[in-house]
Amino acid sequence: MAGSIPHQVQVRVPATTANLGSGFDILGLALQLYNSFTLTLTSVPGWQVQLRPGVTLPTDSSNLVYRAARRLFEYVGHIPAGLHLALATDIPLARGLGSSSSAIVGGLVAANHLTGNTLDKEALLAMAIDIEGHPDNVTPALMGSLTLSYTAAAQHRYLRLAFPPELTIIVAIPDFELPTTQARAVLPTQVSRADAVFNCSRTALFIYAIQNQRYDLLATAMDDRLHQPYRAALVPGMTEAITTAYAAGALGVALSGAGPTLLAIAQEHTAAVATALREAFQCRGIGCQICQLHVDTTGATVL
């Protein structure tokens, strides 16, 4: 490739938490926990993947980073002879923290950079949503911060909203995976009008509470009837963890994405909230990793 177009790029993509309780398939939040993808154009034909020791991911054409990158290469009409991918992954797999979204966004952003940034962010987002199937994780992964996704005239659109920097996001990551397909399979295909109205009011309340620092409203705003009650059976200790985290001082608690990770929002008492979440899982014989995070405001970044 000629000119100033590079032959190697490193892209950092944040973890994301979706739904935030009531905002099912609508709200997403980028977190300061990252995967890093280094993509190199090579003259050696084929696809090569370099993983950290102990990481188990596909190293063939089914790799999600490769699939996303190839989608963009094909779209712009340039198929490189060979590609080498090196991954540094800190976002755990199948835990409700957007690991697949990070791979999709990372592959698209890296391939776009290697082809001279042919597409803008809006086009990249549309492609990412098409691959992922829903917008709530890929949008904050690409754009950063708190995002609200919606459709208008059959087009995906979003708003990027500020999230108060004084709030800490505590995530409790249990020692088992929960594939998104399994977590979606337990959801009903129809819900009652009462449950729909319940969630609409809570989602609106969440946006108001965040924008106006009314943190006393978050517990009500993050209550949900559309997905969490159905997924509780898939996450042992979830109900107890939510109750004890509130008692320890959390402002809001919810399942992170499809789970099994739980997230709590806190301004104070972060250590007590973390302990409450950990002990609720331990009472069910489940170990968990605790991370205290803040919001990523930049999204996917070329390093």
Image: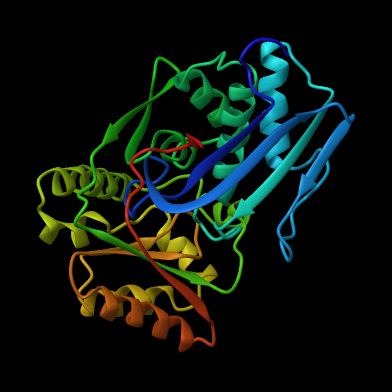
Q: Quadrant of the N terminus?
A: top right
Question: Can residue 18 be seen?
Answer: no
Which of the 4 quarters of the picture holds residue 136?
top left
State whether residue 144 is above or below residue 111.
Answer: below
Give the left or right position of residue 253, taking residue 2 as reference: left
x, y percentage for residue 56? 74, 59
Q: Can residue 229 be seen here?
A: yes
How far across and how far down the image is residue 75, in percent?
68, 15
Residue most extreme to the front: 3
Relative to 4, 97 lies left or right: left
Q: Could you say where residue 252 lies in the image, as x and y percent from the top left?
A: 25, 63
Residue 227: % across, % down? 43, 55
7 and 21: which is toward the camera: 7
Q: How many marks?
A: 0
Q: Residue furthest right?
A: 45
Q: Classify residue 119 as left or right of residue 58.
A: left
Which residue shows up at 55% across the image and 17% down it?
A: 117
Establish if 185 lies above or below 281.
above
- Colour mapping used in the image: rainbow
Report which quarter residue 200 is drawn in. top left
| Rendering quarter of residue 150 | top left
